[in-house]
Amino acid sequence: MRLAACVLVVACGCGLFQPGAATATARVRETRRLMGVPWTITVYAATREAAASATAAAFAEVQRLEGILSDYDPESELSRLSAAAPTAVPVAVSRDLWTVLAAAVAWRERSGGAFDPAVGPLTSLWRQSRRSGVMPRAEKLSAARRAVGPHVLVLEEPTRTVMLREPAMRLDLGGIGMGYAIDRGMEVLAAHGIESAMIDASGDIAVSGPPPGEQAWRIEVAAFGTREQDRGGETLALVNAAVTTSGDAFQAVEIDGVRYSHVVDPRTGLGVPGPAAVTVIAADGTTADAVATAASVLGPVAGLALVETVPGAAARFVSGVGAGRSEVRSSRWPARLAQPRR
């Protein structure tokens, strides 16, 4: 499953930790491939055994959620729900799937449809265009758009059930599911007594308390390519926060002379024109993931307006390259670097 938006957010390595950090504290850093991308978890604990046990539990939680939220695995709960469309009666779903769907619908309303958990038919069609380099045929695009929008997905909160109203609809939580899994992983680490941790899901990052001897985690952010390619990169200092970037750095296609992102605008059915990227800082991964996706679709003006409504959140928009490069930032960038502990 590929839930993450295209990013380049690189957590600093050994240079992050200054001499004098508590030598009795064990540091464990482990990488596994989950949800279609590498996940790296770094934790500090009293002993290596405690750190390893907490890390293993967090990875297990992410793997469990992959079986619920994946739109690539035909046996996942999300895929089986999509396959049941249209549903004759409301369908009960697990607590995790309900939580993510409810958050996704809330962001759909808040973003005016720039974020849509029912965007699946359009993302599938756009993937074909990215492979072929040819724009979708008008009749196929029109058909896919009929299966997307607020009318196709209805949540019934009292019973925690879901109604799918279009036979061709398909749910896609690619703009929020990774962030939710990161948050759940951080909760598992906290339950194991870990106070200083970072989860990096191929660029979608969340951190808790700072490493021993440090005031914050330092995370290097670049909008396009490597920092050498993207002279606009910068380093953020974060505590109890999340950061993610949505853009076309690594997943883009040029059609008829126009560069398009893999991120699909649910309102048009096409990829967002680029080159462009937005980096969002928020209190949690779910929020950062969803806001970055919506803001990428909305663009700098409407996107920044959305970011300003999210308490504690901040964003930086970068578009163009070379002499045509431009950048705008929200009023709180680089945000409240130390968020209240969740």
Image (cartoon, grey):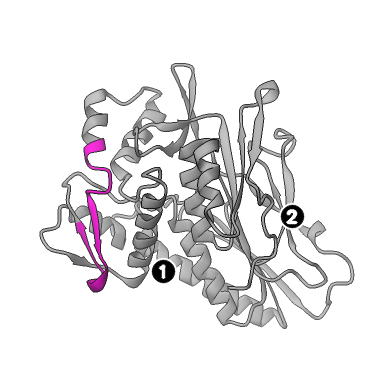
| Secondary structure state at the residue bearing disc 1 | helix
Q: Which mark is residue 12?
A: 2
Against 225, residue 133 (above or below) is above
Say which residue appears at 23% left-offset and 30% top-offset. Answer: 142
For mark 1, what is the residue? 64
Against 328, residue 23 (above or below) is below
Q: In screen coordinates, is 51 left or right of 181?
A: right
- Quadrant containing the C terminus is bottom right
Residue 269 visible in this rendered orientation of the protein: yes
Say which residue appears at 15% left-offset and 52% top-offset. Answer: 86
Q: In screen coordinates, is 265 left or right of 213?
A: left
Point out residue 202 in the picture as x, y percentages from the top left corner. Answer: 57, 52
State how far apart marks 2 and 1 are (Cα): 28 Å
Say which residue appears at 36% left-offset and 34% top-offset. Answer: 126
Name the residue nearer the viewer: 321 or 326: 326
Q: In screen coordinates, is 159 left or right of 125?
A: left
Q: For the view shown, which residue lies furthest in the top direction? A: 256
Is 89 within the magenta?
no
Residue 203 visible in this rendered orientation of the protein: no
Q: Amino acid at mark 1?
A: Arg
